[in-house]
Image: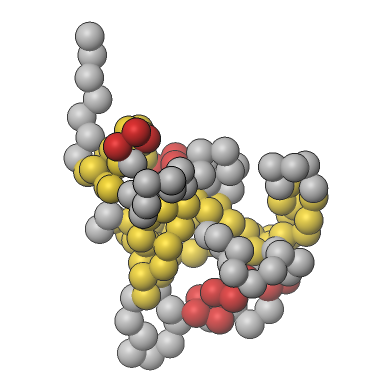
Amino acid sequence: MPSLDFTHEHDYRAGPDDHSPEVQIRIFPKGIGSVPVAITAVLDSGASVSMFDKSLLGLFGIADIATGQKGEVRTANNEIADAFVHNLDIEFLGRQMTIPVMFSPVWPDGTPNLLGMKGFFEQLLIAFKHQERAALVAFI
């Protein structure tokens, strides 16, 4: 039986009833002397594109959400909202990557950050050992 060679195992256990694979990523604020900031994001294999809380826009040096490429985001309950895509630099498990991230002006502040397929999962092999609340990751 073939096996996959994963180089990282990430524990996402936050509590016994937590079924959300949350991970820490680092983002790189714009500005002289800025240091990377750690934020929490959910590994969301059901999201076609990553989606971040719009309150983070200023950290990325984005003054106007509408300067991104216009698109739409569809929620799990099939609602559609306007969103804008920006290509952003992040770091996950020590690897820097540039990924497209959507921001929606109508989603409330505090919306969970989601890491989706396009740009993010495309760079990874990932498997979930969900009973153990762990994600196995290899970069491709």
User: In this picture, is 86 found above or below 71?
Assistant: below
Q: Residue at x 78, y 59 (%)?
A: 82
Q: Nearer the viewer, residue 18 or 111?
A: 18
Which percent across, then down, holds residue 37? Answer: 37, 75
Residue that protrudes farthest toward the top in the picture: 1
Q: Nearer the viewer, residue 49 or 111?
A: 111
Give left or right: position of 27 versus 135. right
Q: Is residue 118 visible?
A: no
Which percent across, then down, holds residue 93? Answer: 27, 54
Q: Residue at x 39, y 42 (%)?
A: 123
Quadrant in the picture for residue 70: bottom right
Residue that protrudes farthest toward the front in the picture: 16
Q: How many marks?
A: 0
Q: Residue at x 68, y 78 (%)?
A: 64
Q: How is the image coloured?
A: secondary structure
User: In this picture, is 44 found above or below 128?
Assistant: below
User: In this picture, is 46 found above or below 96?
Assistant: above
Q: Nearer the viewer, residue 17 or 87?
A: 17
Give left or right: position of 122 versus 111. left
Q: Quadrant of the N terminus?
A: top left
Q: Residue at x 37, y 35 (%)?
A: 130
